Image (cartoon, rainbow, N blue to C red):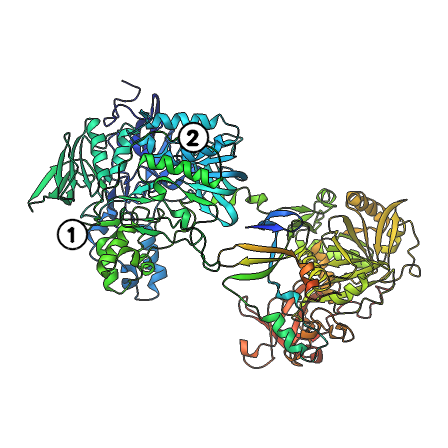
Amino acid sequence: MIIDHPLLGPRDSSEFTYMGDAALIDRPDPEAEDAAQAFYEYAYLRDNPAGWHRELWFHEAGDRSWLVVTRNTLTHEISKVELARDVARSRGRSR
Amino acid sequence: MSVGSRTQKNRLSGGQIDRDTALTFTFDGKRYCGHGGDTLASALLANGVRLMGRSFKYHRPRGPLSAGSEEPNALVQLRSGARQEPNTRATTAELFDGLQARSQNRLGSLSCDLLAVNDRLSTFLTAGFYYKTFMWPKAFWERVYEPVIRRAAGLGSLSLSEDPDVYDKGFLHCDLLVIGAGPAGLMAALTAARSGANVILADEDFRMGGRLNAETLTIDDSPGADWAAATVAELAAMPNVRLMPRTTVIGAFDHGIYGAVERVSDHLTVPHPDKPRQILWRIYTQRTVLAAGAIERPIAFPNNDRPGIMTASALRTYANRYGVAVDRRAVVFTNNDDGHRTATDLHAKGITVTVVDVRPETPRALDYEVLAGAQVTDTMGRLGLTFAKLRLADGSDRIIECGALGVSGGWNPNLHLTCHHRGRPQWNARLAAFVPDIRPDSRPDSRPGGLPEGMFVAGAANGDFSTAAALEGGARAAWAALDLGGARPEIPQAEDRPVNLLPFWHVKGPGRAWLDQQNDVTVKDVTLSHQEGFTSVEHLKRYTTLGMATDQGKTANLGGLAIMAELAGKSIPEVGTTMFRPPYTPVAIGALGGRHRGQQFHPKRLTPSHAWAEEQGAVFVEVGNWLRAQWFPRVGETTWRDSVDREVLATRGSVGVCDVTTLGKVDVQGADAAEFLNRIYCNGFAKLPVGRTRYGLMLREDGIALDDGTAARLAEDHFVVTTTTANALPVYRHMEFVRQCLLPDMDVQLISTTEAWAQFAVAGPKARRVLEKIVDQDISNAAFPFMACANVTVCGGLRARLFRISFSGELAYEIAVPTAYGDALIRRIMEAGAEFAITPYGTEALGVMRIEKGHAAGNELNGTTTALTLGMERMVSTKKDSIGAVLSRREGLNDPDGLRQVGIRPLDPSAHLPAGAHLMARTGPVDAAHDQGYVTSACYSPTLGHHIALAFLKNGTNRLGETLRLVSPLTGVDLAVEVCSPHFVDPEGDRLRA
């Protein structure tokens, strides 16, 4: 596969390490009342869709950026590649 | 008369061979002669040898069925010694001088194979025979049945020596990849190349031209083979074209990546010393033209597997391309007009031909006999065809003497690569064949299928079987693929005959009719499988093994499907096809491995003191990719324990030094560096003063320990984090994940500096005395206490980092200098320590000292342990959020009866404690249900004079002093042990702070 890195252009997938569902960006609030349940779901429950999937790839043999790659798990078509940092900010994460 | 031709009794005139080059070779020890341009099969046939192998199951005599890579039968063993290569297709093995070939899968000689008795037992050896027969007694399968069956059935054998050849991998990029160099592929390549595009043209054959080399047809009034040669020459002269003969494109992978195997040296006696034997190429391309041609399929009839019976097109190829008559009397059995083309060509070569055509209406022939509405019903000949028995249109039988029988059941497009992205072929009734699904890619995006993106199909691979259609299709495909404008390319003139075919799959009647010759699957097997309920095509395949041999049923599958369809009363497309998956033809494991073998299997990382350690005679151990000194043997030491015990005692007694560069180092910088570490580690780092180091434990988000190490604060906004050697990469990845994905607005930067700094641990009561001579600053206990850290200089000005941390439990420092100075520093430390008899120690002594101190390492951080298990539960701060904090509070991880780290010592001081042994109550059963825990790390402690161990024990913290049984049924160990504190040496830590 070839991943079109937003900063570096098309790179071979062998340069990357895969970590699965990009929902890992949405780490629950540890202060919330239901934190235990929320963290349990966050750590253990994953969707495994046949079709479009947003997933995390780490450019380990490259610039070491985490990317959110939108990939069709049936066809391996990649429709979107974003810097995970931008996605995290857009989902309200800060510090 | 050309050289060596006297022995080649079946050699004809003409063909694409070099008659001036005589090549001698042996087959089963007998010498033969062939010519340059021959394959092993064509040369053997020229010498009158039709018998080339024995079948897999029944050991039936077999000769080639084809003249190409689809060959199921003529599998031979090439070369000898370490280069011995089994299961090579004689039909593609390019002849070279001195080639040694042997037949395989026989007991005795090829012509008198003792295992041919299986053929007499064939009534019993039908589909599912093994499943049904060798069920009882159960224990017999492994001991008796399987070894016997394995010896009887099977193909060639390996040399069992190391492969002397080199294999390589390579990467290529192009605008257009053309697969197949027949008329369609050549025309596509030419069209693209003339437009200026970068073109790769790959073909599995050693001579480009495809069927044009095997036909008598003309292009623009010159022989097709000449047109092909001229086109190849034009392409070869263009700088934007790369011609890759002997290269099989084995698969279409994602995003325009193709795999291809180039056989660089297989046609040479020995590879050129500077060249590999084969190269596995990865070809990156936006557009591909698949012009892989088609494969003729046989018709099944009783005893259709004798040597001399092959596809009609193979007979034609041997005659036209190689100048070889398989026999001077030939029969062609056909259901279509193409069979008549074979008859015409054979007749022109002086071969007597009779055509048996199943169709009542056939083309007219003046030159050869045609029997319309007739069928071949049986054949004779023990080791090769001698007679064919026919049933004529009027119902009468006739026997014809012949040594060659060409069978033509129609052609199947070579569409394998079009299916590698789950495309499903479409049935074409006019051709009675599956053709690629080339419908445009406009379907909903969740439904996969169709062609791989960017692929165009041309020529016979697309079901366009005439030469004119192939040339036109090739040009058009390149035109469309590259989106070329301007004038259309000129298409040369060529024949454009339509396909006339009457679908016909098998002749009914008694006797076995083979479908898959390599796996010995007959029509009867398919019928039986249907009767027994294996009606899905995927079940049929697995039950009968139809199409599961090394040829993947290229000549067999459609016949099997047709018979399935007939039995089920369905149409062939309703029955469906099995999937085509890479590779297209078998690939040597050597090619897949490339240069990653032996020492090159993975990268080797050397520590900065490696050369010095080698000089000291160190024994090295692989730790991940690193080579680390394991111990430093001295004269007179006979076992590793002698060395390790000495290193430990010398370090604890005076001073020792160890290269600890391999520990991961991560530089953490930025205004939020401290707060970042606060989130990464379960314990607090925000208040760590500058100039101090702290031990830290990282958890995974599920509350399990991830890694441990230290973080040293060199400045307000600068930390150096260390990780264990094994986790250097995963921890860095994890820290980047937290930084980028969870805390994107923190002002913090990370960089891995593991290889930038050479780091040595100097440990022992005399450590300070040694380092005082090297470090330029004051390192007295007052100025540089336990857990201090600082940027310092050494040896009069070289920048360095000094940490007062200890893994051994002694007064210890870790000193780091830029890697380039590592070798110089270790030599300087040894010099400075000479007066204290400084002792280099390796990873074993390091391990012993950490066990003596009760420090956790990889054995303890095994993916199941929590801070509580390690006795560090108080480190998990409840005042802040950190990764893993929430889930570490789960009830299940805080069971009071859960495992806790303890120390173990044997009641008998001479006893040896094995790691992995389990702890049991002193009385009571020894089984998994009564398991109390297990030993994680064990060693002999030279400091204490007996074995010690670290263990995880249920509720261990409250069981100190208890006596337990340590058992290891595997090694026969059963000992009484006492539970103790894991801190065996200096539990108060006085030595650290000295």
x, y (%) of residue B767?
Answer: 85, 55
Report the disc number at residue B269. 2
Residue B818, above or below B806: above
Residue B308, above or below B738: above
Does dot 1 land on a helix, a strand or a loop? loop
Q: Chain of mark 2?
A: B
Report the disc number at residue B884. none
Residue assigned mark 1: B508
x, y (%) of residue B739?
Answer: 72, 61
**Based on the displayed image, in which of its 4 quarters is residue B692 positioned?**
bottom right
Observer-nearest residue: B655 or B358? B358
10 Å crowding of disc 1: few (<14), some (14-19), many (20+): few
Residue in the picture at 33% in, 46% down: B554
Query: Is residue B805 visible to us here?
Result: no
Query: Is residue A28 visible to us here?
Result: yes
- Tag 2: amino acid: Thr
Residue in the picture at 81% in, 66% down: B685
Observer-nearest residue: B533 or B829? B533
* Closer to viewer: mark 2 or mark 1: 1
Observer-nearest residue: A49 or B753? A49
